[in-house]
Amino acid sequence: MKNRAKLILLYLLFFSPGLFAQNANRDHFFKDSIDTYISRALTNWRIPGAAVCVVKDNKIVLMKGYGVKELGLNNKIDQNTLFMIGSNTKAFTATALCILESEHKLSLDDKVTKYMPAFKLESNAATELVTVRDLLCHRLGFGTFQGDFTYWTSNLTREQVIEKMAHVKALYSFRSKWGYTNAAFLTAGQIITAATDRSWESTVKDRIFAPLGMGSTLALSKDLPGAYNKAAPHTIVDGRLIAIPFCQIDNLAPAGSISSNVNDMSKWVMALLNNGKVGPRQFIPESAVLEPRQAQDIVFDNGAGNSEFYGLGWFLKDYNGHREVFHTGGVNGYVSSVTLVPDQNLGIVILTNTDQNNVIEALRDEIVDVYMKKPFRDYSDKYLTQYKTRALKEQQADKKLADSAALHLQPALPVSAYTGKYTSDLYGNMTIDQGGENGELQIRFEHHPKMYALMRPIGGNRFYVTFSDPEFGRAVFPFTVANGKVISARVKVADFIEYTPYEFKKVQ
């Protein structure tokens, strides 16, 4: 009878949010409830594994791994398991530049062209005005993620990525609107090299990782596959959770290539909360910690007091009368979050090995609420309901397209009319041929030589396109035709990569 009662209690804890909310003692959340909360969240969100660290008042409240490194294997995550942290790399880049500024090796208000004379944007006026600070707070006028299809996991070098920025037709005028720009952070990282003759990766290793004792942290994505204790990346395709290859994004390294674990990240967070000190020693100049937390641009303002700002490599918002300094990071197979509440001396690090979950926000918000003495809200279930609603709509829309493709509809023109070479001023070239199975139309991309996409007609001059790399998604490519000839194709990849579509003109 006792065992049966225990099983019933465990069932209620895991599957009855209301009871969990009523019984969870907020003052003892970390002692009594957090393991249950996280395990339940991993199950419900289909996350193989996670690592979590909470620091408060210079003490580690929680540092623990949950789940497994790779789906189907019994290799448990621990506090030293490496995850890619994605855009949480940006705070390291901004801090490194602020360190150099404190040493008078550069100024954030210097013009970019002072260090990179060949740097260009499409607008000549913007080219002349853009500063290092502009790069670090995403105010070039680009739309969020604009240009990333060209750069993400591509074979372009860092120098080539920066040159490509001149071909981006900014959606907004310079400094008029905030737009998240990975290539801007790459450019900022390259300015480190121009100002010091040291690479970005050497600088963050020598000036941040080594002094703080972050001995396991890797600056470059190329080094993660060879690491012993690492979490494998995962995503969801057609409703199935699968492991995927490690992504290589060192051409955008200062924007997102770092891999770390909660043991090392705890040292980073504690140093930031102590304004750069570890014990009595000042390892990072105080100015290099505080300046990135100053608001530089508005991310959004709904006019009802719900505003969000961007500093230098950090998002900023006020919650319950306290300033939150935070960032999330997403790369193929991983999402993460890092949060500071400086006046509460609170830091939170959450690392996961899937790229389709909001647990990083849900758990963060739950932990913040504990210290704000707010009631339990079960953010995980709330966010999961929203996620499932969105996912269902996307699945239904995709099924309609797949069903149309399965009808084997004939395109408006002979299949051979769509083959040939196409070019985009920003991206470069793509080629369409009949090299797919059974003579299906297949697309190859100049700067993604390992990737292809299959085209299936869905009527008229529209094709349902599936990329071999699931991160790039599925889309409809409409072709423009004039006088019986194909003129161009509209190319769109998954929003996870880039929101903005590309126009590829047919040249052969």
Image: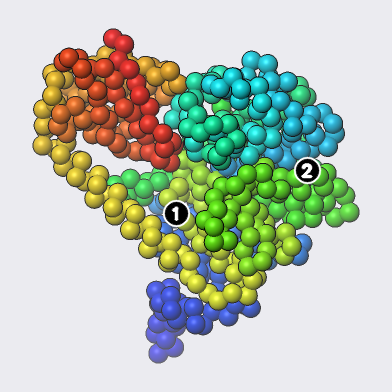
In the rendered view of the protein, which quadrant contains the C terminus?
top left
As drawn, 118 above or below 324: above
Which residue is at the front of the view, 204 or 65?
204
Neighbor class of circle 1 (other Cα within 10 Å; few <14, some 14-19, many 20+) is: many
* Mark sitting earlier along the chain (2/1): 2
Q: CA distance from mark 2 to mark 1?
A: 32 Å
Residue positioned 42% across, 66% down in the render: 381
Q: Is residue 368 left or right of residue 15?
A: right
Check residue 305 in the rendering and tell me which mark sits there, or answer none.
Answer: none
Q: Is residue 415 left or right of residue 474?
A: left
Check residue 357 in the rendering and tell me which mark sits there, or answer none.
Answer: 1
Residue positioned 33% across, 58% down in the render: 389
User: Which quadrant of the figure has residue 13?
Assistant: bottom left
Which residue is at the front of the view, 429 or 240?
429
Q: Is residue 46 visible?
A: yes
Q: Which structural element holds mark 1? A: loop
Which residue is at the front of the view, 29 or 9?
29
Residue positioned 50% across, 69% down in the render: 37
Which residue is at the front of the view, 146 or 7?
146
Q: Is residue 391 left or right of residue 137?
A: left
Give the x, y percent position of residue 313.
64, 43
Q: Which residue carries the number 2 mark?
A: 288
| Of marks 2 and 1, the one in the foreground | 2
The three-letter code of the residue at mark 1 reads: Asn
Q: Which structural element holds mark 2? A: helix
Give the x, y percent position of residue 143.
49, 36
Q: Going by the picture, which residue comes out furthest to the bottom?
A: 1
Give the x, y percent position of residue 350.
57, 55
